[in-house]
Amino acid sequence: MGRNVVVTGGGTGIGLAVARRFADAGDDVVIVGRRREVLRQAAELLGPKVRPLPCDLADPDAVEGLVDQLPRRIDVLVNNAGSREVAAGAGPHALVARWRGDFERNVLTAVLLTETVRDRLTTGQGRVVTVSSIAAIRGAGSYGASKAALHAWNHFLAAQLGPSGITANIVAPGTVAGTEFFGDRLNESELVRRAGRTLVGRVGEPDDVASAVFFLSSPEAGYITGEILHVNGGEILGR
Ligand SMILES: NC(=O)c1ccc[n+]([C@@H]2O[C@H](COP(=O)([O-])OP(=O)(O)OC[C@H]3O[C@@H](n4cnc5c(N)ncnc54)[C@H](OP(=O)(O)O)[C@@H]3O)[C@@H](O)[C@H]2O)c1
């Protein structure tokens, strides 16, 4: 029997690759994001095993409204939705907007949905995988701080879910091209610069991250919990 999988941010980039991986394995996948049309197109691309559900996961009312549409049993929850605030602006108001915004987009999206569905996670084999970033370790202002908060939260979550046989892990990617994350900031020279910071001489692809998420969601990974799996071509080690 296929698993019931929920992938947030599953309409684009890394989340789309993750959703594809599960759908190809015969699982039933719900993809969640804010843009209805983006999700619809992704579901059309990935086939009948994938169901789109629009929702702003930083909005508690919207998340409450989503719950009835989610499967009663969730085998795998992938908290992948997130983004980085690039809005310029100086002064305390801009600073607060940036920090609050990054916290909402990257932390609250994961915490709100996980807490809301935690009673539906399958006892004995449930999996929660949350996507953070290399920025949680190497720092990138409010974005890095918000991703680092996910690491602390995941440790707590793993301890809470462990007695029920449910694991909670983090996948922390380095630079991944082919997503909407960077907008038009990832030009050719920036790609070359970032590839040069890795030990393998290239930036990541969404499938690199999807493979790690898929493994941590597998039955074989049942003895791995509270971990952070870095997927960055060795960038974190430095040259
Ligand atoms: N690309 C990289 O180099 C990189 C590196 C490290 C970590 N990451 C992390 O990887 C994850 C996926 O990013 P990506 O690179 O694939 O970029 P992406 O293409 O921009 O994907 C982000 C997804 O999250 C969804 N999302 C954002 N805020 C949301 C909200 N409030 N509610 C529901 N959905 C929301 C977006 O859909 P809507 O806009 O339609 O809501 C979008 O589908 C993010 O958590 C990102 O921080 C990326």
Image: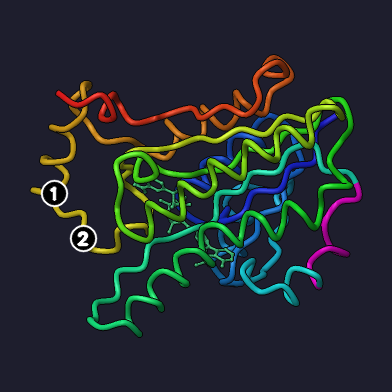
- At x 65%, y 60%, the residue is 32
Q: Residues within 10 Å of mark 2 (few under 14, many from 20)?
A: few
- The residue pinned by badge 1 equals 190
Look at the image and give the residue range highlighted in magenta: 65-72
Q: Residue furthest front?
A: 92
Give residue 143's position: percent from left, percent from top. 38, 57
Dominant SS in magenta: loop
Q: Amino acid at mark 1?
A: Glu
- The residue pinned by badge 2 equals 185
- At x 29%, y 29%, the residue is 236
Q: Which image quarter: residue 197?
A: top left
Foreground pick, 182 / 134:
134
Looking at the image, residue 38 lies above or below residue 234 = below
Foreground pick, 207 / 200:
200
Q: Quadrant of the C terminus?
A: top left
- At x 78%, y 28%, the residue is 162
Q: Amino acid at mark 2?
A: Arg
Tell whether 145 sits left or right of 8: left
